[in-house]
Image: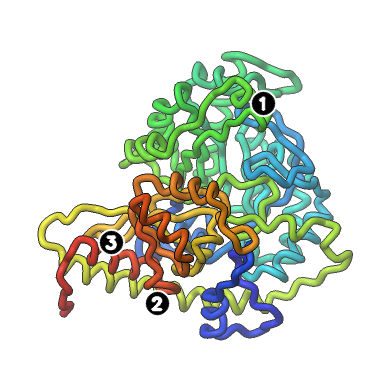
């Protein structure tokens, strides 16, 4: 079952109807941004991020993104990148199933918007560089904006060509840009970038890294000066830039970046990248968390990134792209905004109730805690909406929350293979799930079978289904109080 709500032919969605849709659970198989609330930022900034799943951790529970692969040309070579076309079997940046013309991309966006009411953002992330392949990027955004003016437009770029187009972004009402910055020391860059193509010439070595660094800093400064929100992406490469990323974090904060997304290197020989073929490993979850913790006080970190394909569709953590290949998109499509408008109304009300429930749970925990009861990590199986609403066997990832007297906080996600295949569990996949949950002794699920529950218990992991369909914060707080043996508290 898809993680995105399907509200069928509803033109008006009541809160009860949409909530039941979110809570429905079938048996067949099928990226943190700012966690701030409206009171924590100025109204103009909140309006930009509140429905953007990449820029708001809260929004990623409710809203979906879509990438269209219209920009295949690239002006740099990264040792961690190998762009693949006509590939549906890898989930990582630079991979697409089909390249689109701007006209086809616009038609596809309308088809997706009609089918997925959660869609709030259209991004162009290549599979090359959106600022280098600028004519196609600009034309795609123009066509989409004409027909779907309420869709947020974003682009991802390495920054080398971006300074030439920043003022175009303002004219097109683009107020979100993702800028990849892996170094601020060109010497480090020589180990990541074999070459760049700049000023009609291929450049290598220190010269290439120096030019790229200067253009990236120029891009960041220009975007900040114009009020465009910037998310900086950095790939953590152990032994090359892992320690250096602390300096990157400080520098991008100083230059006004809204978020810093430190992503683990995806590196395997079958991907065909230089790093993959050379055996360069990616960081462990513990190494990534250590680096993120060390960046405390620097730029705000995004911890819910899923390192999406260049043609991803759906909520973060899922990809429905194969449902919308061009052979499945009608030749003529007309945009119908009614479902998306109804969904937004539901989200606005649901968000308020969820925040109130989280504050009440926090107050109860604070009143019950005597001294320092310590923090606890709890895994959650969820398919969106901020609720515990996914069957254990259907989960392809688990969201990890930390809880203590200060409340409940999303800290990361952990991916795993789908344990449930045709309704039957496979032991080797369950072993992978158990490995994925290393260091976690509690998981909250909507439902779980007896056999996997017993296997998890044997591995020291308690699976709890007593809080099915409740808000995550409420349930996590209740489990924390129970496990810490905290007394019930009376709240004045």
Nearest to N terminus: mark 2 or mark 3: 2
Q: Quadrant of the C terminus?
A: bottom left
SS at badge 3 = strand
Disc 1 from disc 2: Cα separation:
47 Å
Work out whether 235 lies above or below 413.
above
The residue that appears at 83% across and 56% down in the rendered structure is 326
For residue 77, the mark is: 1
Q: Position of residue 201 (x, y in %)?
A: 74, 19
Question: Along the horizontal axis of the image, is 399 left or right of 323?
Answer: left
Q: Residue at x 72, y 64 (%)?
A: 112
Q: Position of residue 21 (x, y in %)?
A: 57, 77
- Tag 2, which secondary structure? helix
Give the quadrant of residue 76: top right
Residue at point 64%, 37% (across, down): 162
Residue 320 quadrant? bottom right
Whether residue 227 is visible to the viewer of this picture, yes or no, is: no
- Per the model, the C-alpha gap separating discs 1 and 3 is 43 Å
Query: On residue 407, which mark appears?
Result: 3
Marks 1 and 2 close (CB-CB < 8 Å)? no
For the view shown, which residue lies furthest in the left direction?
A: 371
Q: Distance between the residues labelled 2 and 3?
A: 16 Å
Q: Which quadrant: the N terminus?
A: bottom right
Q: Name the residue under label 2.
A: 353
Which residue is at a point 76% across and 59% down the rendered structure image? 324
Residue 83 percent location from the top left of the image: 71, 35
Choose the circle earlier in sequence order: 1 or 2: 1
Q: Is residue 410 left or right of residue 481?
A: right
């Amino acid at each position: 079952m898809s993680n995105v709500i399907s509200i069928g032919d509803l033109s008006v969605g009541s809160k009860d109807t949409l909530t039941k849709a979110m809570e429905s659970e079938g048996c067949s198989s099928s990226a943190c941004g700012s966690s701030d609330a409206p009171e924590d930022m100025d109204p103009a900034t909140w309006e930009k991020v509140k429905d953007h799943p990449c820029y708001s951790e809260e929004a990623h529970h409710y809203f979906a993104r879509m990438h269209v692969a219209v920009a295949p040309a690239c002006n740099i070579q990264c040792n961690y990148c190998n762009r693949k076309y006509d590939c549906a079997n890898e989930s990582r940046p630079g991979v697409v199933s089909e390249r689109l013309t701007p006209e086809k991309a616009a038609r596809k966006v309308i088809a997706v918007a009609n089918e997925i009411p959660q869609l709030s953002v259209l991004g162009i992330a290549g599979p090359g560089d959106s600022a280098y392949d600028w004519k196609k990027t600009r034309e795609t955004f123009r066509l989409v904006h004409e027909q779907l003016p309420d869709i947020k437009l974003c682009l991802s770029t390495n920054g080398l060509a971006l300074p030439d187009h920043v003022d175009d972004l303002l004219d097109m009402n683009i107020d979100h840009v993702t800028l990849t910055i892996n170094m601020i020391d060109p010497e480090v860059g020589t180990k990541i970038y074999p070459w760049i193509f700049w000023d009609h010439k291929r450049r290598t070595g220190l010269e290439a890294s120096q030019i790229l660094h200067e253009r990236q800093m120029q891009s960041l400064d220009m975007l900040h000066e114009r009020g465009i929100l910037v998310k900086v992406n950095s790939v953590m490469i152990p032994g090359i830039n892992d320690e250096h990323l602390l300096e990157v974090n400080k520098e991008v904060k100083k230059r006004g970046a809204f978020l810093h997304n430190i992503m683990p290197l995806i590196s395997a020989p079958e991907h065909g990248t230089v790093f993959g073929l050379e055996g360069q490993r990616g960081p462990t979850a513990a190494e990534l968390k250590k680096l993120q913790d060390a960046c405390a006080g620097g730029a705000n970190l995004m911890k819910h990134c899923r390192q999406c394909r260049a043609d991803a569709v759906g909520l973060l953590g899922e990809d429905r792209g194969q449902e919308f290949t061009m052979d499945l998109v009608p030749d003529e499509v007309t945009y119908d905004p009614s479902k998306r408008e109804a969904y937004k109304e539901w989200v606005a009300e649901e968000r308020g109730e969820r925040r109130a429930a989280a504050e009440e749970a926090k107050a109860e925990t604070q009143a019950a805690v005597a001294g320092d009861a310590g923090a606890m990590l709890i895994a959650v199986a969820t398919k969106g909406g901020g609720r515990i609403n996914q069957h254990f066997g259907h989960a392809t990832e688990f969201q990890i929350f930390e809880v203590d007297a200060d409340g409940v906080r999303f800290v990361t996600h952990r991916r795993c293979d789908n344990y449930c295949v045709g309704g039957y569990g496979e032991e080797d996949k369950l072993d992978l799930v158990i490995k994925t949950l290393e260091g976690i002794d509690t998981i909250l699920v909507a439902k779980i079978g007896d056999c996997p529950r017993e296997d998890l218990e044997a591995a020291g992991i308690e699976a709890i289904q007593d809080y099915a369909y409740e808000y995550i914060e409420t349930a996590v707080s209740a489990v924390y109080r129970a496990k810490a043996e905290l007394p019930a508290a009376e709240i004045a």
